[in-house]
Image (spheres, rainbow, N blue to C red):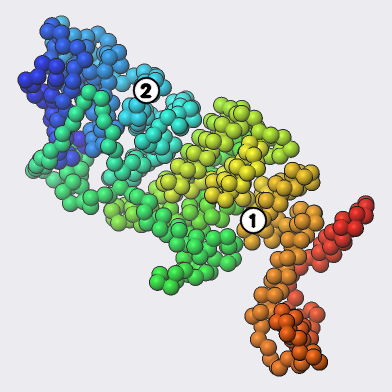
Amino acid sequence: GGLCMCYSVASDIPDEITYSIYFLHKGYNKTFTVSLERTESHQLKEVAFMNLDYYVAAYLPGQFLHLLNIQHPDLLCYSLFLTGEDARIDMLQNCSIRSPLMSTVLDCYVGSMYAVSICHSALLQFLQNSKQDSERLAALHCALLYFQRTEDSEMQIIWWISENLSTCHSFDPIQEFIIASLYCRMCPEAHNLDKLLPYTSLLDWIGIIPGVTCATDIISLPVLEFQNSKGFWGKLSSNLESVKYAEPHLHYRNNVLRREWRSILIGCLLCSFGDFCLFTNQREERRTTAYLRNIFENAKKLLWTLGTLVSKSCLDERLIPLFQEEDYQQQLLMGLMVAQLKDHLMRHLQYVGKKKIDQIVLDYVANLLNLIHRIMKEVWRRYQLHSCIFCFDERGSTEEFTVFHIMSRILEAANGMCMPLPPGFHTLHLGLGVRCLPLHTLLHYIDNGVLHLTETCVRKLLRDLDDTEENEKLKFSIVMRLPETLGQKIHQFWNHPVNANLIARKYVKLLLEKLGNRQCSRPIPERLSVPVEFLPLNYLANMLAEIESQGVHPYENQDHVNVRFVEETALKHTMTLLGLNCS
């Protein structure tokens, strides 16, 4: 659906070449001025243009080869600007050429025709050797969108990403890999879906291309005189209509999803599903149980769809916590993303049935989670990690620390795009963190939200580690940071006086809070024969008198407490304080 007109402009400056490309399907043209590396008089100064389907190639033998992205020409970082040996086309050196057909060139000197295509292996090699972000981003998108996806090429790209997370400064390679891969997989599912799904995580790009300047001008759109066209002309007509009448930004963005996600977390964070009938800000519409139930129903359908993509045979045993836990926060985000993306597509794809859109959305989010699983699987395989990350009595290896860093970048990428993570991701991440990080760094990561405490990992940590001084410090620091709802489940797994003290303090605090909220039904009798000028003592006496006067039945309003556990814990605590043998 792209229509371009290309021509070379005569330049008065001997060491410059200027050419223009009119992107008629986009409504603008771009004029490129290229500084030549060599200006020998015998070299050609005529730029040849070739149609490579997804790209228009501008080729000056011996000087440069530019592969200009015609589907997404707005950002130059998605076009390849090659020079030197990278710009060499075999058998087409220093000769006059024309491109009469797509992916075909004619050597005007000898009358021979050649098929021209981008070499996949050469592109991946260029990606490995590239030094600039613009080259990396253009090569990455070309590898993901231009070529058919294969297991081997995907593995090579993931390995490259794992090695270059710290060298890419203007973009996040994990985000670009996920977004571009999803765009390539899902766009064939429906007409015009390529205009609605995001193809990049970048909103803008302000980098420069060495030796190349570009100027953009608005042009008039072509007028097509036919209707009900199909194939290429139908796609072109659809593109022109989108430029004329569509909203400025049709591609799905996560702004609304992020706001909704944060709003619900404010009211529902750290609550179980049964407690999700909660309030929100008074200025907003009250969240109902039905609304949240629908979100979790979306997540349930999504996880079922994901199960067809990630079968048990494909799930690496070294990544067992993945997809094996019920992470309610991640399920909430999954369900929200399904709902928001569905609303976006329903607004612009009215001619597509609701059932079809539902399936597209479920496939999109399921493939997103599967891509994250694929990244982790390849990283685990490359660094030869095993399930020993949950053996907390040993310190982590250098390879484990590298994988921990990669998982931290995956988490950062997901947070930046408001994308859900596979259930169990935080358990794996925390397990690596406990093994690899010193205590103060581990706690710093927990306090700043990089590491999330999960029931599976904390329970195993409390059970498996003995109570040495160092381990006690680790356990106590973890227990003190547990959310209240999680702490109620976890505390009983650490049989230690410090933990018993925490349980007792929380229980006394709960009783005092209930007592403070209780209204006194009758006057408190005066129990002090002589007034004492000490307010705390007066308050304590009055409080005890109130409790006595109410005469609450010992089993009335009793909290659900494991009495036997409290008795045993109190006994062991007392024996420890007295220095007695607990055996």
Q: Where in the figure is residue 367, as x and y percent of width and height?
A: 46, 42
Badge 2 density bin: few <14, some 14–19, many ≥20, Cα 10 Å: some
* Amino acid at the residue labelled 1: Leu
- 90 relative to 262, above or below: above
User: In the displayed structure, would residue 482 be above or below residue 147?
Assistant: below
Q: For residue 188, which quarter of the picture?
A: top left
Q: Residue at x 39, y 48 (%)?
A: 360
Q: Nearer the viewer, residue 552 or 523?
A: 523
Instruction: Report the residue at 64% width, 61% height from top.
Output: 484
Residue sitting at x 36%, y 54%? 255
User: Residue 567, how many percent across, how many down?
Assistant: 85, 64
Point out which mark residue 482 bears: 1
| Residue labelled with disc 2 | 130
Q: Secondary structure at mark 1?
A: loop
Relative to 542, is 178 above or below? above
Q: Is residue 429 visible?
A: yes
**Residue placed furthest toward the front:** 533
Q: Is residue 142 left or right of residue 423?
A: left
Kind of residue at disc 2: Ser
Residue 318 sits in quarter: top right
Distance (Cα) linking label 1 and label 2: 45 Å
